[in-house]
Image (spheres, rainbow, N blue to C red):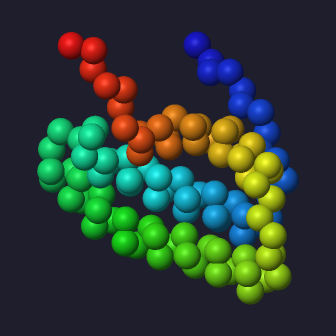
Amino acid sequence: MLLPELPPLPALTRAEAELIDRYLEVVDLLGRINPARVTHTYGALRAAQALVGRATALKDALTLMHLRGENEVYADTLAEALRILDGERRVNRVTMPPASTS
C-alpha cells in the first residue's frame, strides 16, 4: 500500500530550509526530554546531551540567515512547511499530556 503523496513544500531559501530542519530536530529532542511524557531517564539524558549541539546548529542557521540579509521571517510560509513536515504532531510531544480522568 502506497502512502498518500504529501503536498510540495513552499519555496524556501536554503537558510530557511536549514532553520526548519534544525528547529524540528530541537523540538524532537525536547519531546524526548519532556518529564511529563518520558518513562526512562537514560533516553531523556541522551536527548538532553544531543540538545546542546542541535541548539547550536539552530543558532547557526539563524545567524546565517541574518548574515545573508534574510532579516525577515515569513511565518506563514514557514508554518506551512512545518505542517507538511508533521510539525504539529512533533511539537505536541513538548506539551503537557491531557489530564487523566481517573
Residue 49 position in % (x across, y down):
28, 67
The quadrant the C terminus occupies is: top left
Residue drawn at the location 47% of the way across and 76% of the way down: 56
Locate residue 59, reporting x and y percent: 55, 76
- Residue in view at x 79 percent, y 39 percent: 8
Q: Is 53 drawn above or below residue 100 in the view shown?
A: below
Residue 65: image x %, image y %?
Answer: 73, 76
Residue nearest the viewer, comparing 92 with 100 = 100
Q: Position of residue 44 (x, y in %)?
A: 23, 53
Q: Quadrant of residue 96?
A: top left
- Quarter of the figure with the N terminus: top right
**Above or below 41: residue 89:** above
Q: Quadrant of residue 54?
A: bottom left
Name, please, the residue furthest toward the bottom: 67
Please say if 45 is above or below 54. above
Q: Is residue 86 above or below residue 82?
A: above
Q: Which residue occupies 80% across, 59% down?
A: 74
What is the number of callouts on the image? 0
Relative placement, left or right, of 77 versus 87 is right
Q: Residue at x 64, y 74 (%)?
A: 62
Left or right of 48 in this view: 40: left
Determine whether, in the image, residue 3 is placed left or right of residue 94.
Answer: right
